[in-house]
Image (cartoon, helix red, strand yellow):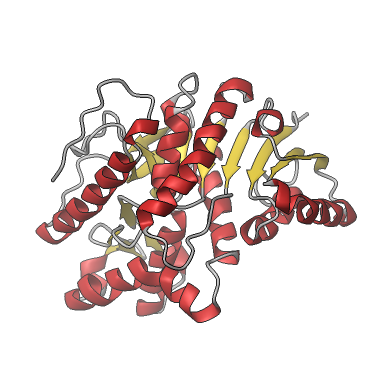
Amino acid sequence: MYEVKRIAVTGAAGQIAYQLLFRIASGELFGPHQPVSLHLLDIEPCFESMRGVVMELEDCSYPLLKNIEVGIDPFIVFSEIDIAILIGSAPRMPGMERKDLIYKNAEIFVQQGMALNEVAKREVKVFVIGNPCNTNCLITMNHAPNISRKQFYAMTRLDLNRAKYFLAKKVGVTVNEISQMIIWGNHSSTQVPDFEHVQISGKPIADIITDKNWLQEEFVACIQQRGAAIIKARGKSSAASAAKATLDFVQDLCLNPTHRDWFSTGICSDYNPYGIEENLVFSFPCILNQSGTWEIIDNLSWSPFIEKKIAITRKELLEERDLVRNLLKVKHLSLIHI
């Protein structure tokens, strides 16, 4: 007998949530035997639209969907939840600087962190999708001190999916034959798609793709700029692909670890083996151990090319942290500028 899993989704009236919620309710996320309760949060102007989504969920008559709760107050919606999927965030408007976007979203994630800290289960796993997701995750984590820092994650799974697809397309194989791809750092245009440890059909990438210039220039730039390219092409940010990546992201950290590939996710950088400053949310390559807890894959080498790219994304995350320093509940936080 499976206990009902309580899953909160914010930004529930938005386009990513619309692509995601029906897949959760159908059993695609946690399997055909796991009943779920959906706890949906959005801002007051979107409440009627969110009610429309609820009507559609009800009309689908999913056997696994046991309950739906909706609201605009995270201190109510997050009560006793097992999973938090934080999608809702303010969009970047024309003329808005990145720092303005960070400030605007900080208010949202301060409140949600406090709500998680007060009313969610202590074992809750928190998945931050809303951008800038690394720093939004950092803010949330710092306002939920009663929840382990190992339970907060920022999504770089979409970047990983993109990278796997383009490598597979390059050599004419399926994405299932691409393994050990890594995304380091920030979910932004400074992210580092590290191809150097990739295996293709069990063989080192250097044995399959000999055009190093294509990898370092065209491939890396394509993954870094893919989100902007989609916005330019369709006038909106990724929705269906972001929802699919969210499913993969949650499954990476919640499902049976047997025979699983490496995955990349933004996690708390405390005690990491690569010398990245503590109190950042930085994407590292990870695996799940047999107890279901993530571990960073250590002892990986960085070429001068990758090391230079990592320095850039690290610097950006330090700058973002500096912008929200006053919102972080950390005493005597020493920022390192590079």
Describe residue 34's horizontal placement relative to residue 278 as left or right.
Answer: right
- In this rendering, the answer to whether 78 lies above or below 261 is above
Residue at x 38%, y 66% (from the top left corner): 163
Taking the view exactly as shown, the residue that stands out farthest to the left is 304
How far from the left and from the top, in percent, is residue 186? Answer: 33, 51
Residue 123 higher or lower than 312, as above or below: above
- Asked whether, in this view, residue 154 is left or right of residue 5, the answer is left
Q: Quadrant of the N terminus?
A: top right
Looking at the picture, how far across and down is residue 20, in whole percent?
Answer: 66, 55
Q: Does residue 260 show up?
A: no
Q: At 39% across and 45% down in the image, what residue appears?
A: 134
Question: Measuring 72% from the left and 46% from the top, which residue is drawn there?
Answer: 44
Report how many numbered discs are placed on residues in the image.
Answer: 0
162 sits left or right of 57 in the view: left
Q: Residue at x 33, y 24 (%)?
A: 330
Given the current orientation, which residue lies at the most extreme front position?
Answer: 95
Q: Quick check: can you spot residue 14?
A: yes
Residue 149 in which image quadrant: top left
Picture coordinates of residue 82, whole percent (x, y): 63, 31
Q: x and y percent of residue 100 in the render?
A: 40, 53
| Residue 333: quadrant of the picture | top left
Picture quadrant where residue 41 is located:
top right
| Residue sitting nearer the eye, 172 or 225 | 225
Between 218 and 46, the one lying in front of the other is 46
